[in-house]
Amino acid sequence: ASDSYKTSYSVAGDYRQKTVPVGSLDSPNALGLYDMSGNVSEWCSDWYDSGYYRNSPSNNPTGPASGSHRVLRGGSWYDVAHGARVAVRHDYRPVVRLSNVGIRLARTR
């Protein structure tokens, strides 16, 4: 966990209580990705199952085939510091709309 406290929780000690533009939290990580924690929690395509990881494949687990709740990853500006990590996993019904939840758009080169 090489994420700095700045990246994981706030911008230079300033708890903003809102989302901020990409790149505002810190420099990119080793993979060139910005703001992997601490801005918004991000929707994943995986369905949630609280016991899935106990029986899942260790390489690229995709989650159950169906369900009622989707996975959210990473912490947001709303979370306490230890909750603002990419390993953090929450679940919500897909119809939930919150100001600290979003998506990450990505493209391949």
Image (cartoon, rainbow, N blue to C red):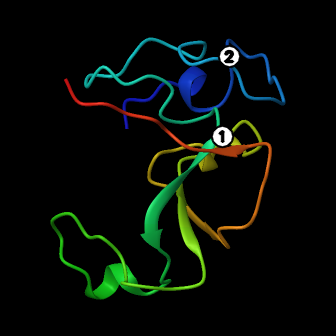
Q: Position of residue 43 (x, y in %)?
A: 55, 54
Q: Residue at (80%, 43%) from the top-left corner? A: 99
Using the image as rendered, state which of residue 92 and residue 83 is in the foreground.
92
Q: How many marks?
A: 2
Q: Residues within 10 Å of mark 1 (few under 14, many from 20)?
A: some
Q: Residue at (48%, 83%) from the top-left corner? A: 49
The quadrant where residue 96 appears: bottom right
Residue identifier under label 2:
11
Q: Helix, strand, or loop for circle 2? A: loop
Q: Position of residue 54 (x, y in %)?
A: 32, 85
Residue 81 numbered tag: 1
Q: Position of residue 7 (x, y in %)?
A: 55, 24
Give the Cα separation between the discs numbered 2 and 1: 12 Å
User: Left of 87 or right of it: where is 97?
Assistant: right
**Amino acid type of disc 2?**
Val
Query: Which of pointers 2 and 1 lies earlier in the amino acid sequence?
Result: 2
Residue 78, compared with residue 38, is above or below; it is below
**Amino acid type of disc 1?**
Ala
Q: Helix, strand, or loop for circle 1? A: helix
Q: Quadrant of the C terminus?
A: top left
